[in-house]
Image: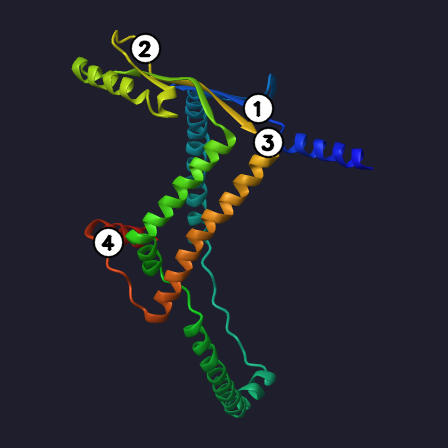
Amino acid sequence: MIWILGVLCALALVALFFPFVFWIDFGADFNGAKARVCLYKKVLGSFSKNFRKEASDRSRDDTRKDVPEKQSATQVDTDKDSVVEASTATPATPVEKKDTPKQTEEKTEGPTETKATVETVAKKDEKESKEAEPQEAESKEKRSLTDKEFWTLLLTPEFDSRAWWSVRRWMSALFRLFRVRFVDCFVEGFRMEYHHMGYAAALNGFLKSYPYIGDWDFRMDWTRDHDPRIEGHVRISVNLCRLLGLSIATLFYGGIVAWSFWRRRTHILKTGELPELGFIRSKIVKMMMEDN
């Protein structure tokens, strides 16, 4: 019995810590983009998009649509002319309506019915006013944030600092747990003045000492014959234990952001006081209000 438990524990450990290595090959330029996802050496899926073909197809579709639109416009004009001619040729003759005895009876019974309807409408208005008073009180207690209050809350410096801190921590946990590595990644085709390209090349050499950014190579186009292009590979190592760790980190940092947002929301709803923002943040709030 003990050896069976030992085997089960060993299998559970293997399942938790067995690594699944994914490779993502990508490349893009002005002509198109492509990507491929592999598990070890097996291709799981690929994606490619050609920008020039889509642009040419759209231009062809536009030229094809212009011709039937012009034809339909001419047909509509001719139909309108024919309708106008027909209407002018055959004028309509007025028809006199005679009141039936039923209609005369309805006219005599009108005043009595209007009195009853007025009384019923007044009773309904009283009931609606009585029902609306508690609903208004509940809405005041359970009201939601306005657009101005919402964007002001999001753009407060304290909330932004805590949110960005949580996002940075979560991103670092993602890269560390999944062991994300960039392999042979480069961006080429930078064209500037020669002394500016020299400064950029020196900065590229300085950034080689930093993680993740140092895996990228930014190549200057000294000979003016290389089009802008990006290409590289991404290596991701995943196992069940790391997925559990990432889910715990997501719940922890997401809970911090949600708690700080909810606490400030309740304070604004109770007091109605908005925090003071700087010049730039207040301008952003006004822009967001105009967009909405």
> How many labels sit on residues?
4
Amino acid on which the number 1 mark rests in the picture: Val
Secondary structure type for disc 2: loop
Amino acid on which the number 3 mark rests in the picture: Asn
Tell me residue 6's x, y (percent).
Answer: 75, 34
Which residue extends farthest right? 1
Q: CB of mark 4 within 8 Å of CB of mark 2? A: no
Tell me the residue that label 2 is attached to: 226
Tell me the residue that label 3 is attached to: 239
Q: Residues within 10 Å of mark 4 (few under 14, many from 20)?
A: some
Q: Is residue 151 above or below residue 98?
A: above
Q: Is residue 104 above or below residue 251?
A: below
**Mark 4 or mark 2, earlier in chain:** 2
Distance of label 3 from label 1 (alpha carbons): 9 Å
Residue at horizontal 62 percent and vertical 31 percent from the top: 17
Q: Is residue 15 above or below residue 230?
A: below
**Mark 3 or mark 1, earlier in chain:** 1
Residue at horizontal 60 percent and vertical 26 percent from the top: 19
